[in-house]
Image (cartoon, grey):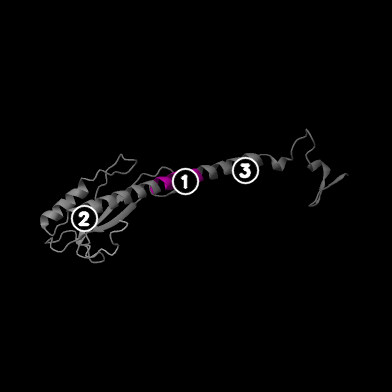
């Protein structure tokens, strides 16, 4: 009996694949299983990347919408109920959209406060002293690959922004250079 010497152990020579010979019966299909499992992992990683990328883009779109709507609404505040109505209308008329500009934001919440860190009221009885507005936007982008692994078919993306009018009472910067 001939013994082939390898680095790990002694194995019979007939178990070693000779040039042009056939592989051992126990090794058949190993490459197929390895390639198949590797392909599944790559496709799953690609799907996760696509879905998370979409959620990230929608998050940026929602934050941009909330920022712009809050600033536009804050410009309308003048201490009256008519100013609050104009502020709500400014948010409703915002042209920013999500889903690459194809879907409008629905269910946007608008609330008002007299201080930046105070309690925000969505339906104040008076506009007196209200100088800050908070806009909350929500979008639910569809997910394509995550449902395959048992996750939800839609993601929940939320963004909020606060803007206000702060009177400038002193100009410490001076007039030079600007």
The label nearer to you, 3 versus 1, is 1
Q: Earlier in the sequence, mark 3 or mark 2?
A: 3
| 167 versus 62 height, above or below | below
Judging by the rendered image, the residue that carries numbered circle 3 is 34
Q: Position of residue 162 (x, y in %)?
A: 27, 58
**Mark 3 and mark 1 residues within 8 Å of each other at the beta carbon:** no
State the image quarter where residue 117 is shown.
bottom left
Q: Residue furthest top?
A: 20
Judging by the rendered image, the residue that carries numbered circle 2 is 74
Rounded to the nearest angstrom, the CA distance separating label 2 from label 1 is: 37 Å
> Residue 49 shows which numbered tag?
1
Q: Position of residue 132 (x, y in %)?
A: 22, 60
Q: Nearer the viewer, residue 137 or 17?
A: 137
| 167 versus 22 height, above or below | below
Give the residue displayed 66% in from the left and 42% down from the top: 30
Q: Badge 2, how many Cα within 10 Å: few under 14, some, many 20+?
A: many
The magenta stretch spans which residues? 45-55
> Residue 118 shows which numbered tag?
none
| 121 versus 140 height, above or below | below
Residue 53 belongs to the span the image colors magenta:
yes
Rounded to the nearest angstrom, the CA distance separating label 3 from label 2 is: 60 Å
Q: Position of residue 18 (x, y in %)?
A: 80, 37
Q: Earlier in the sequence, mark 3 or mark 1?
A: 3
Give the residue displayed 32% in from the left and 54% down from the top: 159
Rounded to the nearest angstrom, the CA distance separating label 3 from label 1 is: 22 Å
Q: Badge 3, how many Cα within 10 Å: few under 14, some, many 20+?
A: few
State the image quarter where residue 131 is shown.
bottom left
Callout 1 secondary element: helix
Q: Is residue 22 visible?
A: yes
Callout 2 secondary element: helix
């Amino acid at each position: 009996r001939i013994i082939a010497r390898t680095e790990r152990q002694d194995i019979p020579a007939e178990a070693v694949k000779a040039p042009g010979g056939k592989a051992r019966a126990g090794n058949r299909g190993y490459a197929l299983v390895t390639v198949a499992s590797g392909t599944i992992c790559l496709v799953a990683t690609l799907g996760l990347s696509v879905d998370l990328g979409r959620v990230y883009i929608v998050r940026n779109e929602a934050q941009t919408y909330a920022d712009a709507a809050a600033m536009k609404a804050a410009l309308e505040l003048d201490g009256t109920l008519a100013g609050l109505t104009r502020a709500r209308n400014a948010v409703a008329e915002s042209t920013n959209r999500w889903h690459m500009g194809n879907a409008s934001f629905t269910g946007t919440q608008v609330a008002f406060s007299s201080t930046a860190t105070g309690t925000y009221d969505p339906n104040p009885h008076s506009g007196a002293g209200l100088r800050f507005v908070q806009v909350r936007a929500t979008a639910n982008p569809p997910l394509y690959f995550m449902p395959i692994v048992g996750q939800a078919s839609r993601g929940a993306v939320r963004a909020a922004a606060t803007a206000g009018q702060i009177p400038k009472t002193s100009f410490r910067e001076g007039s030079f250079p600007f």
